[in-house]
Image (cartoon, rainbow, N blue to C red):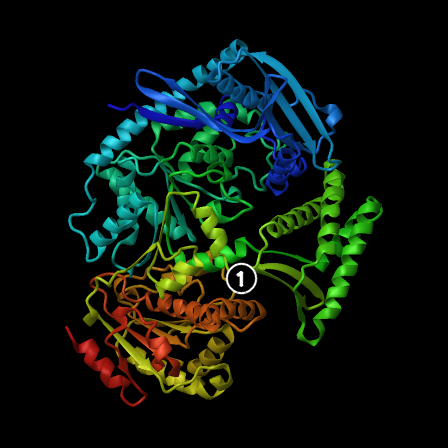
Amino acid sequence: MNKQNIKISVRDLVEFIMRCGDLNNEFVGRSNNRALEGSKIHRKIQRSQAENYQKEVTLKHNVEYSEFILTIEGRADGIYNDNDMITVDEIKTTTASLDDIDVNYNPLHLAQAKCYAYIYGMQNDLVNINVQLTYYNIDTDEIRYLKNTFSIEELKKFFDDLVRKYYDWAKLSYDWIIERNDSIKKMDFPYKDYRKGQRELAVAVYRTVERGKKLFVQAPTGIGKTISTIFPAVKAMGEELTSKIFYLTAKTITRTVAEDAFNRMKDNGLKFKTLVLTAKEKICFIEKPNCSPETCEYAEGHFDRVNDAIMDILKHEHNYSKEIIEKYAKKHRVCPFEFSLDLSLWADAVICDYNHVFDPNVSLKRFFQENNDFTLLIDEAHNLVDRSREMFSAEINKKQFLDAKKLIKDKGPKIKKVLNNINKIFLKLKKLCGDNNYYIIKDGESELFGYLRQLVNLLEEYLLKKVKIDEYENILDLYFDVLKYLKISDLYDDTYTTYVEMIGYDVKIKLFCLDPSKLLFDIMKKCKSSIFFSATMLPLKYYRSILGGNDDDYMMYLYSPFDVNNREILIADNVSTKYKDREKTYQTIVDYIDLTVNGRIGNYMVFFPSYEYMNKVYKIFRQKYPEKSIYIQESGMSDEERYDFLNLFQENNDGLIGFCVLGGVFSEGIDLKHNRLIGAIIVGVGLPQICLERNLIRDYFDRKYGLGYEFAYMYPGMNKVMQAAGRVIRTETDKGVILLIDERYSHRNYVKLFPKEWFPNMRVNIDNIGKHLDKFWSMK
């Protein structure tokens, strides 16, 4: 029988065993964001070496125990032979003066290099070996080489000591994997029966993970897609087809649903460690997060205590929810956020927001720097299109730089000079906007990038001095905004465009990601498998193409498990809701709403294309039918106000009408079961508002596929419509009506986008809609 293999990287081993002292996330320069220049500098130094310099050398060493094999692996930056003496090179970037750096500058750097040297030396029967630390100063381009010679015996003692200290952790991991996998093999589907489509989805997910592919699934409400994706992914883990599951969502409520699904399986005997990652601002124990030992008792000595906290929670808990993490963080006096990030290494499944995997600025880089065998379960995947565009884009505006100039005053003359130069470029670009109020930069703005890099260096030096000005935080924000802009510029290719836009008196420059598919693909190729699922993933080929899939990946269309006789789809196609026709349609819309809600007393939602349209119809409806209970969605509602609004929709009340905005917070992700909602009236086809960015997307996909209007407007619009319609039928016993108002709903291009459960449907008008509603509601 093959022994279980427990893996850890050299870097993780060194950092985990040797870390100590305070947690300090105060501004310390570009070490806050090394990825911007670190990899480039590594490649630059590696290219400058002699021909005998081997770069990125993969090293692996197995330590065999009676129970398991511990594999320690990693990549040395470089290895070369100089006069028959082997040297292992570890490259580090820094902003510190090289005069202040010696071999003891950072013990972790030396420890990592010594591990690589031991593995290489032992595998190649060496007696002695050189360890070289190469420090590169980002600001001055100076390099310092620190070289020491070690005997392999010395390195063996050092390495064996690290491994000895890690043994208990490896044993804990080994014991857990045995217990976990045994429970997975015994686990059955946690419900008595599969719903219609549920078994097919579960089988497809398992096979997709097994084959290392992507799967794009249209899974209507009621199938139970959460459990149908989690269950087979867990089964695949039991067969060692994947080592970790990331369940990605856009909303807190879907995170809760995923957590409940795991808990249901645990109630049926599953042994599984699940972690819910919470944003730093929401889990921090102090009002405003400030990770420094001077301001937070949990930061002081954090690394002295955090391993004890991890061991404690691993031995006593399987669910790492926000509440559980806070409990153990307080017990051991450690930072709850950093504690949760550490726990992600030990969790079998991590439930988190999309950005923890895909956002280049905040992703969990400890997992996605190298290839791995992880599985991504991406819920409500239609949301990832615009979310990923946002993650991969960056912008700066003129006002930021003018405000910084006023704040710094005479304390930074060099900074003021660069800010003046940046302002001049903004003024030049402003003139180019002309009457259109925008300008597309076709050849980039290389002069601006030069000044922005200068500014980053000067601001870094300025901020490191901890100058006590009133708006220190504003300067810090500018620094990170510029850094993000430069970082996104490293991703820039033909899937991007740069535009300048006038916003009132301000000027904005944006690096805008038109097509996120390539960047999403690059991230997902580091994982084994990705499953995209949503109740609204139509057309599937559109989502497969824009979310980083290709023709080799799978698509799956599942039918609704609900009885079509429980829903009535009505189409009022004698009304134009196009912007130019809206003023003529207000009264007709009012009449359709009244006739629909009169069909049966109950709760209804009416969805409009904009607040303006909604408010005008609301005013007329209120005047004409003052006796009806109408509630309207307000712009910028707080969480409490949203909760109160939804709480109005109760069963067996006298009926009410909610006026809402299509694509808003009440058109997606809410679950009003049974008689809490019996009808949805959707005004218009949900087209996004015509704007510069949408037109840029249109032009790009016109060039790429000849489908610019569809990609920019039609498909996103119909997704909002399908989401709103999906609020009505939530369980197999629900019954409800969906009225679609717009002449375009009879056009062939729109009809072919209808989900299959929208057939059959009925075309209606003001004169006959009442008759159709009477017939539907009278059916048992």
Q: Nearer the viewer, residue 540 or 684?
A: 540
Compared with 328, 664 (above or below) is below
Furthest toward the bottom, the residue is 767
Above/below status of 270 relative to 6:
below
Q: Is residue 600 above or below residue 370?
A: below
| Residue 705 horizontal side relative to residue 669, left or right | right
Residue position marked by numbered label 1 in the rendering: 514
Tell me if 359 is positioned left or right of 553 in this view: right
Query: As rendered, which of 270 and 65 lies closer to the eye?
Result: 65
Q: Quadrant of residue 269?
A: top left
Give the x, y percent position of residue 707: 45, 71
Q: Quadrant of the N terminus?
A: top left
| Residue sitting at x 60%, y 39% | 39
Q: Which part of the image, by quadrant, shows the C terminus?
A: bottom left
Amino acid on which the number 1 mark rests in the picture: Leu
Q: Position of residue 629 (x, y in %)?
A: 37, 74
Q: Quadrant of residue 685?
A: bottom left
Instruction: Provide residue 532's location: percent of width, then percent of height.
Output: 36, 54
Apparent side of residue 30 relative to residue 74 in the rendered image (left or right) = right
Q: Residues within 10 Å of mark 1 (few under 14, many from 20)?
A: many
